[in-house]
Amino acid sequence: MTFETLNLKPEIIKAVTELGFTSPTPIQQHVYNTIAEHGQTDIVALSQTGTGKTAAFGLPLLNTIQAHDRGIQAVILAPTRELCLQIQTELEKYAKHLIGLTSIPVYGGAPIQTQIRQLKSQVHIVTATPGRLRDLLDRKAIRLDAVKHLVLDEADVMLNMGFQEDLDAILEHISGAHNTWLFSATMPSSVERIAKRFMNSPVHISTGKTNETADNLSHDYFLVAHAERYTALVHILDFNPGLFAMIFCRTKRDTQELSDRLIRDGYLADAIHGDLSQAQRDTVMNRFRSGHLRLLVATDVAARGIDVQGITHVFNYHLPEDVEQYTHRTGRTARAGNAGAAFSLVSPKEQAKVKQIERFIKQKIHLRELPGKTEIIKKRLQLELQQIADVDADTQKLEPYLKTIPDTLTALNTTQILAKLIFPIYERLLKKYEGEKSRSKSKPKTGRVFINLGTMDGLDIKSLKHFLQSQCQIPESMVFNVQMKRSGSFFETESQFKHLAEQLNSGKHMFQGRRLRSEWMDHGYSETSKPERRSKQHSDFDKPRSKRYDENSKGGFGKPRDFRKKRSR
């Protein structure tokens, strides 16, 4: 099948031919055939990212728009600003020869008044993020009563991002006769509910098994201790020169810290996360798209909708909390038929999570050995030699200078000359990896901390870690070996956070109306030791329970257990 055999307008055929498109992708073929067979109908299309979904809905959509009719005829909903703009860019390419057809993107982060002015002119297609479109509806700045086509692109991502309420409100506004085309990489129950509630006997299309990743994407993981995660990442990066990759972390803080560390070590890296302004984000993305950055460190939310050509690798520096996110992360590579690789750094405790992901994507994730120092140095030296071999040297221009080469150099054979050329590189690499070895041997000093918070305060290990990070700025990842008792807890952390732990004794930190205190212990802690009982003088045990546990107190972590309730006999 070719685009010429489809029932598309000549102007659209001309545009896709100029773009170099020759034949439709599988998802495009299925959508076109469905429309040809059933006419305009509701469609649920399951296909991975990078398979040509924009053209799958964009071309038939443009084929049905009547430029002479007024009113918005089509709405395309996308989860992020980036995807919104990418869809708009593609539509403009496909519609370049269609006279009088107009489309605009509307999204958060841009002046809404400007978008309202644009909507007052003749617009046929609106590509929008759910939040901004609902805002425009609430302001009565947009009318959707003439809409004939609604496209939900990356519906699973929109629902994962919490747009369920916005989607419901928007779909209620598009109440006239229209077709809904839903595109999704995965098919969770939330997407199925949308299809059942708002679609009329949709035709289901799938170009692969549910939730599977691309066939041309390899999946590997490396087993590493938590403290060695960064070293493992650097070894993989150095062993794979020339990669163009995205690296995913769980939190904004982890993302920025990893990016800063990579930059300090000489890698072309930067980060995107929710704390960046839109201008900062645009600058980072432009540098990444242009190739000035080779590594983009991102959180899941910040990476939504990113479509950058040529990404060779996706790294899971931390495994995603939700196994479905693995599909969205790895969908950034192996796009448009290109090969890609997904590498995950996994601690021993996380191996069960790998099995969960395997069951979800229905593919094996292979355990691989980390490249060692000798392997990396060999690989890097071969690369340096290849670069020397690839130099196009003009010997005629160099002839006057070649005569000045000292006899000591001309007396050397080829092997000796090459050895002298690459020896400085070898020494630099050796120094780098020997330095890593010495650093790993000298583990950071740690201390044991007692804090007068325990299970009777309604806390568990997770909430205690969250409290220490939010109130004391001790990162959750740096709180380990936690031992919780009824009236107090012990935990370990690195000595660099000693001053933060000791700040709990300043009298400024409160929990449910009670002052906190802590004690730092460098040595001599026994696992069998017990936290000291709070003295009546400094405790709140003698206060009425209603005063001890004020639900309006700041920093609470849920209701404590009611110790007054007697156990039933």
Image (cartoon, rainbow, N blue to C red):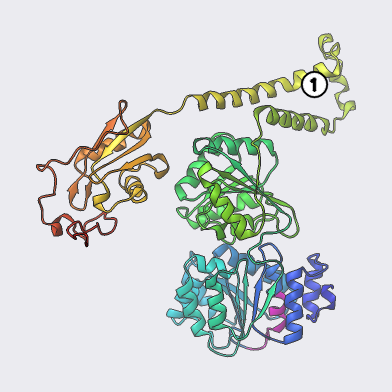
Q: Which residue is drawn at 30% across and 26% down?
A: 524
Q: In terms of depth relative to the viewer, which is nearer, 137 or 541?
A: 541
Q: In this view, does 158 lie above or below 302?
A: below
Residue 497 vs 190, above or below: the answer is above
Q: Where is residue 452 in the image (x, y as percent from the top left)?
A: 23, 42
Q: Say which quadrant the C terminus sits in.
A: bottom left
Which residue lies under the disc numbered 1? Answer: 418
Q: Which of 294 and 190 is in front in this view?
A: 190
Q: What stretch is highlighted in magenta?
A: 58-69
Query: From this viewpoint, which residue is outermost toward the right?
Result: 396
**Which quadrant holds the N terminus?**
bottom right
Q: Residues within 10 Å of mark 1 (few under 14, many from 20)?
A: few
Position above or below: 378 against 404: below
> For this view, does 405 lie left or right of residue 494?
right
- In terms of image quadrants, where is residue 368? top right
Q: Is residue 365 left or right of residue 460?
A: right
- Is 67 part of what is drawn in magenta? yes
